Image (spheres, rainbow, N blue to C red):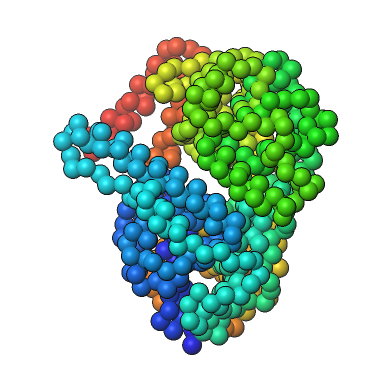
Amino acid sequence: MAMTISFHGAARTVTGSCLEVEVGGKRILLDCGLFQGTRSIEALNQEPFAFDPAGIDAVVLSHAHIDHCGLLPKLAAQGYAGPIWCTPETVDLLEYMLADAGRIQEYEAERRNRRRDRAGEEPFEPLYTEADAMTAWRLARPVMLDEWFEPAEGIRTRLWNAGHILGAASIEVEGGGVRMMFSADIGPDNKAFLPQPQGGAGFDHVICEATYGDRARSRVTMEERRELLAAVIDETLGRGGNLVIPAFALERTQELLLDIATLSGNGRIGPAMVFVDSPLANRATGVFRKYVRGLQDTAGRDVFAHPSIHYVHDASESMRLNSLSGAIIIAASGMCEAGRIRHHLLHNLPRRESTILFVGFQAGGSLGRVIQEGARRVRISGQEVAVRAQIRSIDSYSAHADQGELLDWMRDRGPVSGSLFLDHGEEQAALELGRLAKAAQLAPSVIVPEIGERYELQAGTPAKRLATGRPDLRRVMARDWQNDYADLATNLKQKLGRINDPDARREAIAAMQRVLDSYGKA
Ligand SMILES: [Zn+2]
């Protein structure tokens, strides 16, 4: 007897988490996530599944982030009707996260079809609809942490707290005489609301994420982080401006509310009006409130009911915030690409007394990144806006373990008698973490898998590769030209501006033009 695993996503890339586990003809999926990022990576969402959806016996889901659950609606629409096992918190968050994802897919298809219509092309079908999303959500079944269950005959699983976001779990799998651990996303040591990640020890095989496999963060305690936030609040409200914070709706928004409620509760900041302006964040906060008794760092109180926090419900109420001064406005999306944050930027970027505070990663090419890097003018919804507001960043909010914390997590799962796989990380990050894991002798074999690879797992011996990865995906997974282009375009004007002599500036532009033309001739 043995266990076979197949990597269908999140290998040498950070999204599309999906691992197929097969024991004695029974098949389960650990996660079924959406690919996100560049256009060529997102194109993978349109491909047929590498397995028959109707042939899957069960899904075990680690958490409600879209890159782990965002293809469940497609799976259900294509014939999967079995249970989706996850923690009760994840069941609740999943309803809103999937519905939101369905609406985004419908909106995106509509937008593309407006263009296609003009060009006389065939209409583009949405990847899935909000109705598909709800069909998938109805398959969700709650299971508590630390409790063994049998998703399919001959396969036992148990969920462990991953310390990543509310409800997030690592998944232990036993079957075919093999003990295996799938980390999914692991949280950092200093994470609000959640205890340290756990996961048992002494596995045959371990699959560990590598998102920050090549990065060590400076360790900032929760108190130090709150002090940084308090300073930004003080300086902004002291000037009479608004503090506008673009934030992810799930977890980051609630961490900010916890920090603000704590600072306000101990008198560190004066009374401030806080507006949470994102329908998805409001719904996610509702789930946090439902489980608030089990959350750490809240001193046993419902911090989300703090009297200074106001939840904005409809769009007209959101628009009324435009005439305010001296308020803290938390809105999505986190990278300023969509959502209500855009009109708050439109109204606050030109105001010298306001501050835009970034508390999350801004991908290259996103509006958030452009503002963060000091652009003097930006375009929002077709309008040119001058940036006069103060731009600040606090980079110590994170839901992911860094390099040292990932190594600690892997060490705690030891001794590993077979193979250690590093997935869910850009190639460079996974390879670097793999090098360190090998040097620390964390397992007899260390593998950085590729999408499409299949392995046979036996107890006490390194994994055997049964199928190789897809060579066509190697280029897709590598940083593609659109990333490089976005970085170049973001900095181009600034770099040209640094050339003092106008003639030299024109010569630089002409030289770039010559380089591009030379490719046209080839
Ligand atoms: Zn996650």
Q: Residue at x 82, y 30 (%)?
A: 268
Q: Nearer the viewer, residue 209 or 168?
A: 168
Could you say where residue 398 lies in the image, as x and y percent from the top left? 64, 46
Q: Residue at x 20, y 34 (%)?
A: 117
Q: Residue furthest left?
A: 120
Q: Residue at x 64, y 16 (%)?
A: 325
For residue 284, say whether it is visible: yes
Considering the image in quadrants, where does the C terminus appear? top left
Q: Nearer the viewer, residue 98 or 350?
A: 98
* Number of marks in picture: 0
Which quadrant of the view contains residue 195? Answer: bottom right
In this image, 459 relative to 21: left or right? right
In this image, 195 relative to 505: left or right? right
Could you say where residue 181 lies in the image, as x and y percent from the top left? 59, 71
In this rendering, is residue 383 above or below 24?
above
Could you say where residue 232 lies in the image, as x and y percent from the top left? 71, 27
In this image, 67 relative to 189: left or right? left
Q: Residue at x 32, y 53 (%)?
A: 46
Could you say where residue 502 lies in the image, as x and y percent from the top left? 45, 11
Which quadrant of the view contains residue 110? Answer: top left
Q: Residue furthest top?
A: 502
Which quadrant of the view contains residue 383? Answer: top left
For residue 357, say whether it is visible: no
